[in-house]
Amino acid sequence: MIFFILLTLTAFFVSGVFSDGTDKVTMMEGDSVTLQTGVKTIHLEDIKWYCNSIRIAQINGDQSFICTDVQCNKGTERFRDRLKLDHQTGSLTITDTKTTDSGVYELKIINNSNISERIFSVTVLGVSASEKDKMKRKSVKEGESVTLDPGVIKNPNDVMTWYFNDTFIAEITGDQSKICTDDQCEERFRDRLKLDHQTGSLIITDTRTTDSGLYKLQISSSIRRHRRSISITSWKTFIVTVFDFALSSAAVAGICICVLLLVAAAAAVIYYGRHQTKSKDSRRQCSDQKTHLKDSSPNPSDSALMATANETSPDGNERLLIRH
């Protein structure tokens, strides 16, 4: 019973670990995105969605009231026909996203007097159709490393320049490399950028949610044709999303407390088990002693028979034999 309660408490703390903080979502214009509530089935819960503090969708548990965008706020049509609300979970899907959909989305789940919240930071990147076709997507958990590989054969004279959201961050020129040193770039990627001189790949170590965004590689090549030097420039584009799985301090503290309680409970159970074993052994020893004493005590009937035999024996030899 004790273990069941403690395991329940542990599960409670762990289930709340990933609900803290802000979920960052990055996508390209025209994509669809679903913001999950984490609820499997709505049951007597009122779910409300807000975008930049403006209510954009709502559904209650018995589904007697459902609204999206224009229905929730008359006179507004920011998401006209582009919002879908899952009637089972309350999750919100935004289709055919636009750059103007970027912003802070807030989810509120109201159950009786309890209110739980979740925040999403959504960034929609505007890219051309040609870029979108060539773009590579990378998703990684916070703290892991990600490699942006252009997938080309690097020529010795190529100049490969990396940009993050149109800001210069790194460059390879021949056998020389350069990592950004300006204050903003240095603060964001301090000692976390590496370049592969063989492939031109960019490696981001110990990723953070702030690393999510658009990465572009400009490849400048020079070739000689008909005694003339011709410069060719090509681009490689990557969209990186870093998911936030970091533990909050409160969650860490809660898990530590539960672990300590489990250890204490285990020690108590072991101590109780050993005490019970000792008690059983003690009772068994007492029982064995009583049995031994009972078996070793003379039988009154045997003594009477011996006395009678001694009195009636005809000679001393027979009396001695009876005694033995």
Image (cartoon, rainbow, N blue to C red):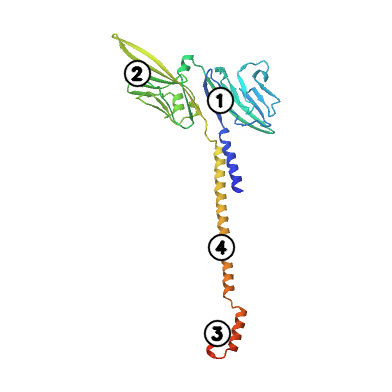
| Frontmost residue, 188 versus 8 | 8
Q: Quadrant of residue 67?
A: top right
| Residue annotated with mark 1 | 121
Depth check, mark 4 against mark 3: the one in front is: 3
How far apart marks 4 and 2 lie (CA) works out to 83 Å
Q: Quadrant of residue 311?
A: bottom right
| Residue annotated with mark 2 | 158
Binning the other alpha carbons within 10 Å of mark 1 as few (below 14), some (14 to 19) or many (20 upward) gives some
How far apart marks 4 and 1 lie (CA) works out to 65 Å
Q: Position of residue 306 (x, y in %)?
A: 59, 83
Is 29 on the left-hand or right-hand side of 193? right
Q: Position of residue 314 (x, y in %)?
A: 57, 91
How far apart marks 2 and 3 lie (CA) works out to 121 Å
Which comes before the other along the chain, label 1 or label 3?
Answer: 1
Residue visible at 42% across and 17% down in the picture: 235
| Residue annotated with mark 3 | 322
Q: Amino acid at mark 2?
A: Asp
Depth check, mark 1 against mark 3: the one in front is: 3
Q: Residue furthest front?
A: 314
- State the SS at label 1: strand
Q: Amino acid at mark 3?
A: Ile
Label pair 4/3, CB-CB below 8 angstroms: no
- State the SS at label 3: helix
Q: Amino acid at mark 4?
A: Asp
| Frontmost residue, 158 versus 250 | 158
Does 114 appear above or below 162?
A: below
| Residue annotated with mark 4 | 281
